[in-house]
């Protein structure tokens, strides 16, 4: 059993410790925003924050994630109010959306360490592949998110998601919450 904190919620995965974190998040925790793209760390679709660092969850086992703090796209902000999420929508830097969660996670990690990145710094820090080729808009979106984070600009909120992660993951057999269950 591997214990970790996922999106500020202590969890224990009753799975083989060699299971990639990607599959524990998607299949056991029902956090499907983390995407399976290539399975070998090339595309970045499965990017999550592990102790604040953007890492590819297909390359990290749940045994290696033991005791660590994991943030998925669902945990970045429950209401899509994170500056990166807002700027990606505002700059129309989302096409098919498959790569978007991994890009948002990588961008959030970049802006946490550098709230005013240059175009070159963004290109170096965002290793994600996008099939639709939104790269110019992506650079603008990340720079705009940096301005929002520095309180130099505001963006109108995106619509709230249709379902809460807690509701979607209520009865998943391979996962057990270590936190007291809320009244239903």
Image (spheres, grey):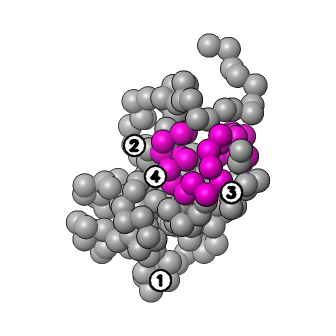
As drawn, the label of residue 158 is 2
* Dot label at residue 79: none
Mark 4, other Cα within 10 Å: few <14 / some 14–19 / many ≥20: many
The image shows residue 72, relative to residue 151, as above or below, that is above
Q: Nearer the viewer, residue 11 or 79?
A: 11
Disc on the earlier residue, 4 or 2? 4
Write down the residue under mark 1. Answer: 124
The x and y percentages for residue 118 are 48, 82
Marks 1 and 2, Cα distance to the nearest angstrom?
28 Å
- Residue beneath disc 3: 63
SS state under label 1: helix
Task: Report the residue at 25% width, 55% height from top.
Answer: 96
Q: Of the residues tagged 3 and 4, which is closer to the observer?
A: 3
Mark toward the start of the polypeptide (3 vs 4): 4
What secondary structure is found at the residue carrying circle 2? loop
> Is residue 17 one of those drawn in magenta?
yes
**Residue 130 screen position, x and y as percent:** 30, 68
- Label 4, secondary structure: give it: loop
């Amino acid at each position: 059993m591997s214990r970790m904190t996922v999106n500020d919620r202590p969890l224990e995965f009753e799975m083989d410790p060699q299971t990639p974190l990607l599959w524990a998040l998607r299949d056991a925790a029902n956090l499907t925003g983390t995407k399976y793209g290539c399975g070998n760390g090339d595309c970045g679709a499965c990017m999550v924050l592990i102790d604040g660092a953007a890492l590819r969850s297909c390359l990290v086992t749940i045994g290696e994630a033991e005791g660590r703090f994991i943030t998925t796209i669902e945990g970045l902000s429950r209401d899509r109010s994170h500056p990166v999420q807002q700027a990606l929508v505002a700059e129309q830097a989302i096409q098919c959306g498959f790569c978007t969660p991994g890009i948002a996670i990588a961008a959030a990690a970049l802006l946490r360490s550098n709230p005013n990145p240059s175009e070159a710094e963004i290109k170096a820090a965002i290793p994600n592949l996008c099939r639709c080729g939104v790269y110019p808009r992506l650079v603008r979106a990340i720079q705009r998110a940096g301005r929002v984070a520095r309180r130099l600009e505001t963006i109108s909120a995106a619509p709230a998601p249709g379902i809460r992660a807690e509701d979607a993951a209520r009865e998943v057999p391979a996962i057990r919450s270590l936190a007291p269950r809320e009244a239903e």
